[in-house]
Image (cartoon, grey):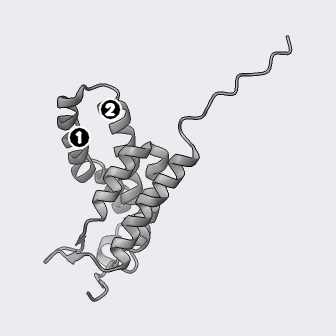
Amino acid sequence: MTDLPDRQKNHLVSLRLCVTAAAFGGAALLVILFGFHIQVPGLNSVSDPRELFVLIGAALTGPVGGIVIGILSGLGDPHTGAHLYIIMMHVVGAVGVGWAYKRLVHDQLPMPYMLIGWVGVVFAYYYILPAPVIAVTKFVFPDYFLQVSPEPRPF
């Protein structure tokens, strides 16, 4: 009984996944570093096309790739002093999208219904997944949101 264990291919981490995640995360980072963002009037946030790279990259690479994409996409955010918060928002969002798309949409729904599932995943990314990060930040660091001052880089 000296059977060697089967060497199963790990589907969570592969070279292709890492390269794809780095490409999408890097593209999201470059969007911010090159100034392709607009300050939302009256809010402490920016709007930019980086979210397209985060959403599509996380859906393609799953939760593990979502971690890489979330970290890279949050590194260049124009708000000084909020980098950790922005990174956590993108990591939680990308991991959630990666898991939800793979397990709930791609593996469960046929094509016409996949589009409805994708809309649900995008809705969750913007409106449901940020809630835990905001709640934990407000509970652990109650003065954090008052201290963060918007200082976006000039266009």
Identify the mark at residue 106; answer none if there is no mark: 2
What residue is pinned by disc 1? 118
In this view, the residue in front, 108 or 41, is 108
Number of labels in the image equals: 2
Q: Residues within 10 Å of mark 1 (few under 14, many from 20)?
A: some
Displayed quadrant of residue 74: bottom left
Q: Residue furthest top?
A: 1
Q: Residues within 10 Å of mark 2 (few under 14, many from 20)?
A: some
Q: Percent x, y for residue 100? A: 34, 38
Question: Which quarter of the rendering shows the C terminus?
Answer: bottom left
What amino acid does circle 1 point to? Trp
Q: What element does badge 2 sit on?
A: helix
Tell me if residue 62 comes above or below residue 26 in the rendering.
above
Displayed quadrant of residue 53: bottom left
Q: Percent x, y for residue 131? A: 29, 52
The structure residue drawn at horizontal position 42% and vertical position 55%, both measured from the top left corner, is 91
Q: Is residue 70 visible?
A: no
Q: Residue furthest left?
A: 41
Q: Is residue 125 visible?
A: yes
What amino acid does circle 2 point to? His
Q: Which of disc 1 and disc 2 is earlier in sequence?
A: 2
Q: What element does badge 1 sit on?
A: helix
Tell me if residue 124 comes above or below residue 73 in the rendering.
above
